[in-house]
Image (cartoon, rainbow, N blue to C red):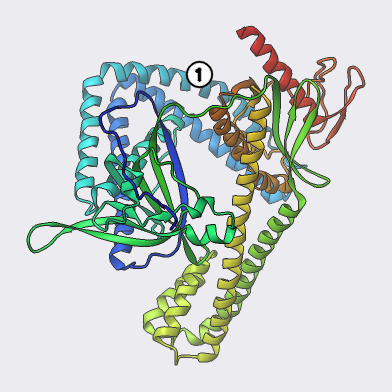
Amino acid sequence: MPEKLGATSETDATEEPEEKHVLVRQYGLLAPLDWDQDCQEHLWLQNRLWNTLVEIEKKHREAYFRLTSSDPELRGIEEALSALMAEKESLIAEKKFLRQAARKKAGVDTSAQDLRIAEIRPEIRRLAVLAKEKRKETRERMKPELDALEQKRREAVKCARNASGLWWGNYNAVCASYETARIRALKTGAELRFHSFDGTGRFTCQIQGGMTVSDFFSGDPQAIVSADPVSLDAFHHPSRGERRKASRTKLRITVTTTKDANGKYVRRMLTFPMILHREIPSDVLIKQLVVSRKRVGTEFRWTATLTGTRSGSPRIVPGKPGICGIDLGWRLVPGGLRVASVADAESVRHIVLPEKMLRRMDHVEDLKSRIDQEQGRLMTWFRARWPEISGSFPEGIRERFANHLKSPMVSSRKLAGSVLAWRDGHGDFRPDLLAALETWRKNNKRMTQEMDNLREKLSAQRTDFYRNEAGRIVQDYSLVGIEDFDLREVVKIETPEGEKTDQPAPARANRVRASVSDLRNWIRIQAAKTGTEIVRIPAADTTRACRQCLHINSGRPEDLVWTCDGCGTVWDQDENAARNIQMAAESAKGKQA
């Protein structure tokens, strides 16, 4: 009889390991076996708590700015800055209106607006710097009042958390997400946003003190989380089919707790069929398990993410001695979409998303276009018939369809919901029209499901492709140079002055396909595993500077092959940039040494 994973419980609680590192595993789940409305309600309560916290944050910011703006000098600077910013936005809007009226940029005189924008731009920069210095001074002077305001915010968060009706593991997760998002928003100047509830969410089980792997696989129905034991055949049997059979188990998690008639807490457990495709090391101490529910098309997908700690330092396999430079970008080339060029002292290789993947991405876009076109035709057809049927339309759903027809953009999900309400509640009213709407709803559901499933699959394939490519890079090199630039600035289609950038529509579409930020993130993750050093190279003409003579050229970015104006050398633009980044990384390494 095969051994069972988690069948033994040999632990040594007397020795505390000196070092620990975090281990994360994610597993697939099938639909829960005992789902009910109370589980849906707890997801909704988490969404409501998030929106409550966002409201608290908005009020806190308003109070903060009222307090810091009480200084007359600072208030005067901010009012002048706001007036100039408003004037600038108005001038930009005027330019856009003139261009739209003329249908083209050529021949439209916007010199007056351009001149005024150029005049106020330095004043805006000066006032912004002055306001920043004055705010810092005001914060230092008003520290006691601001501390009291922050304490008031924390108390409001605590009250919202306690009144949420959620189990402590779930409200702690929402509050942690709020604090993380809040800090990020403060650093970037963004604002937190309210979330509408669409059925997605998560259940978080935090395990105080941790849980051993053997306890996790005990199958104890009263534990905060547990799973049935899994045969070691799931990981070591020579037959893949037998491994897949043996990897099936059942996961039980706590959704909430309630008191019974005797005042004793009773757990509301949720059970999932689980696919344990990867073994959990026996020395892991499990700290948290999160079950996530994600909408894909008209269905939901479930995953379980297990986080634990493991004694000792993580195993680090250092890369080979060597330095490379990586030029990130996106460009269609024969054979696929080039997303990066990797250069070392001897050669350059390219990372290319294969053409087969691009064709499947094209199919996703084609499905999206067909979905939109069919819905547009349906709404045109139904709008033409609305005047004759609106008077006799059933009262229960008349307002819903009237709102759909008023709106220029209608959510297909909401429209399908209205069709179902018509079918289920008033099926005898105009069955001819209902039949046409039902035909559209079924076709829309089928194509939407196909589109979302394929998009999800392609995203996973691209992520796996990038993970493997990043792993190869950090194994081949001990130092990696990457150009330090903000991808958000690269993808903008309009400058702050309202000018259109030179990025054509196909380039913007390929930017989404490439998702080079995902590749850059995987390089960072894989480098942390091997100890490979990453050097960020300032973005300063790495593309335009000739590698041979360092002359700064003025070619077109869309051209792949350039000829240097200085020395006449012909080079691939991406390869030239990668070599420049590699040389800069090598120079930076030499300075450190």
Q: Position of residue 532 (x, y in %)?
A: 59, 24
Q: Which one is nearer the viewer's eye here, 514 or 5?
A: 5
Is residue 543 something one can see in this rendering? no
The residue that mark 1 highlights is 126
Q: Position of residue 25 (x, y in %)?
A: 46, 45
Query: Furthest residue to the left?
Result: 262
Residues packed near mark 1 inside 10 Å, few (<14), some (14 to 19) or many (20 plus):
few
Residue drawn at x 91%, y 17% is 567
Query: Furthest residue to the right?
Result: 568
Which quadrant does the N terminus fall into? bottom left
Count of marks placed on residues = 1
Label 1, secondary structure: give it: helix
Say which amino acid is labelled 1: Arg
| In this rendering, position of residue 41 left or right of residue 126 | left
Residue drawn at x 32%, y 40% is 10
Up the image or down, 116 lies above or below 31; here it is above
Q: Position of residue 111 (x, y in %)?
A: 69, 33
